[in-house]
């Protein structure tokens, strides 16, 4: 096992069956050069990423990362994978290594970054938010540094992004969260109600609004299906208030995001809204 690339004293890149593999261990590259062998006993961690792009991005991040921070992020991700049933992309290693490194630097510099979507993230993504809180606890136990609770929201956003196979970016997750919050606010304001956040109805509504918001933010369009006009007419007659509320949402999305909702999407909105007000 020979060194192909040296990232720092503790991190080397080697070739295994034509694939670049990242090896980490204390002093694993100290006094060595490209082409030298690696002592297997010194290897503490081994990263085999799912794509060459992720591999290269992780290498860029690890160059400036102290070994204790790599250990910290590895503990966090192990806990996330053990506690979470959803499949997560290897991109989580890259994004969390980078984020935690700068979060700790900001803390040491006395810089606190406010997460203005913390409440929305905790409501719309409760599982990911709990994992974010758990990560803060891991950091606290390992370093005696208590990061602000805002960081739980930021970590949750990285987990959410890793749930999508190719990743959509935390900036898009932020936009999706804003759309969900806006639409939920329109429903609550229209009917002057507060939907029980512990109810199955709320869970179903939020899940659908996440899908709806993703179509607005990422796809920027809905596939219209004229065959849904008959069903839409039936729902209009059966649930007139939910229908009008859905139309308000459609106009709001058109005005703010320049995206026109389809008949199919209107029918889903009406059904979920009706369930919510019942």
Image (cartoon, grey):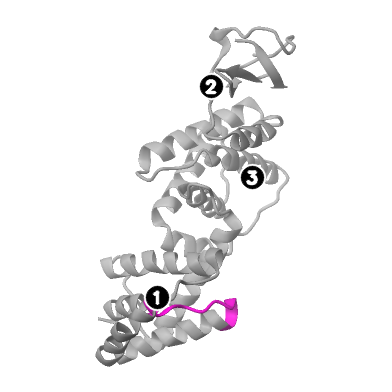
Residue at x 53%, y 21% (from the top left corner):
45
Dot 3, crowdedness within 10 Å: few (<14), some or many (≥20)? some
Q: Residues within 10 Å of mark 2 (few under 14, many from 20)?
A: few
Q: CA distance from mark 2 to mark 1?
A: 47 Å
Query: From mark 2 to mark 3, how far is it between C-alphas?
Result: 23 Å
Residue 70 vs 18, above or below: the answer is below
The relative height of residue 203 versus residue 189 in the rendered view (above or below) is above
Q: Could you say whether the residue bearing mark 1 is in a helix, strand or loop?
A: helix
The one of 167 and 19 positioned closer to us in this rendering: 19
Whether residue 143 is in magenta: the answer is no
Q: Which residue is mark 1?
A: 265
Q: Residues within 10 Å of mark 1 (few under 14, many from 20)?
A: many
The x and y percentages for residue 182 are 50, 76
Find residue 103 and name its label. Answer: 3
The tag earlier along the polypeptide, 3 or 1, is: 3
Residue at image location 65% in from the left, 7% down from the top = 37
Please tell me whether mark 3 or mark 1 is closer to you in this view. Answer: 1
Taking the image as drawn, is residue 137 in sight? yes
Instruction: Look at the picture and state if 133 lies above or below 175.
Output: above
* Mark 2 vs 1, N-terminal side: 2
**Looking at the image, can residue 8 be seen?**
no
Residue 227 coordinates in the image, percent (x, y): 34, 80
Residues tagged 3 and 1 counted as in contact (Cβ below 8 A): no
Work out which quarter of the rendered image holds the C terminus and state it: bottom left
- How far across and down, in percent of the image, does residue 121 sit? 48, 60
Magenta stretch: give its range: 255-266
On-image quarter of the N terminus: top right
Per the image, label 3 sits on a secondary structure element best described as helix
Residue placed under numbered mark 2 in the picture: 45
Depth check, front residue: 165 or 77? 165
């Amino acid at each position: 096992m020979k060194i192909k690339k040296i990232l720092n004293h503790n991190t080397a890149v080697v070739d295994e069956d034509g694939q670049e593999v990242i090896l980490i261990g204390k002093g694993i590259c100290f006094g060595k050069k490209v082409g030298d062998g690696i002592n297997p006993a010194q290897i503490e961690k081994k990263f085999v990423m799912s794509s060459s792009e992720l591999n290269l991005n992780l290498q860029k991040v690890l160059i400036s990362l102290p070994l204790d921070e790599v250990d910290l992020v590895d503990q966090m991700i192990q806990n996330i994978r053990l506690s979470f049933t959803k499949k997560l992309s290897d991109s989580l290693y890259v994004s969390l290594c980078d984020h935690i490194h700068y979060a700790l630097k900001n803390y040491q510099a006395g810089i606190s970054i406010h997460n203005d979507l913390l409440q929305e993230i905790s409501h719309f993504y409760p599982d990911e938010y709990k994992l974010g809180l758990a990560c803060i606890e891991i950091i606290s136990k390992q370093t005696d540094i208590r990061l602000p609770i805002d960081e739980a929201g930021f970590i949750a956003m990285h987990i959410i992004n890793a749930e999508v196979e190719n990743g959509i970016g935390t900036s898009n997750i932020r936009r999706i969260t804003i759309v969900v919050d806006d639409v939920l606010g329109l429903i609550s304001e229209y009917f002057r109600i507060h939907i029980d956040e512990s109810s199955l109805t709320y869970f179903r509504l939020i899940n659908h609004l996440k899908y709806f918001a993703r179509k607005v933010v990422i796809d920027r369009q809905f596939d219209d299906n004229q065959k849904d006009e008959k069903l839409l007419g039936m729902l209009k007659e059966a649930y007139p208030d939910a229908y009008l509320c859905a139309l308000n949402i459609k106009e709001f999305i058109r005005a703010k995001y320049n995206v026109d909702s389809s008949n199919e999407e209107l029918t889903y909105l009406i059904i979920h809204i009706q369930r919510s007000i019942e």
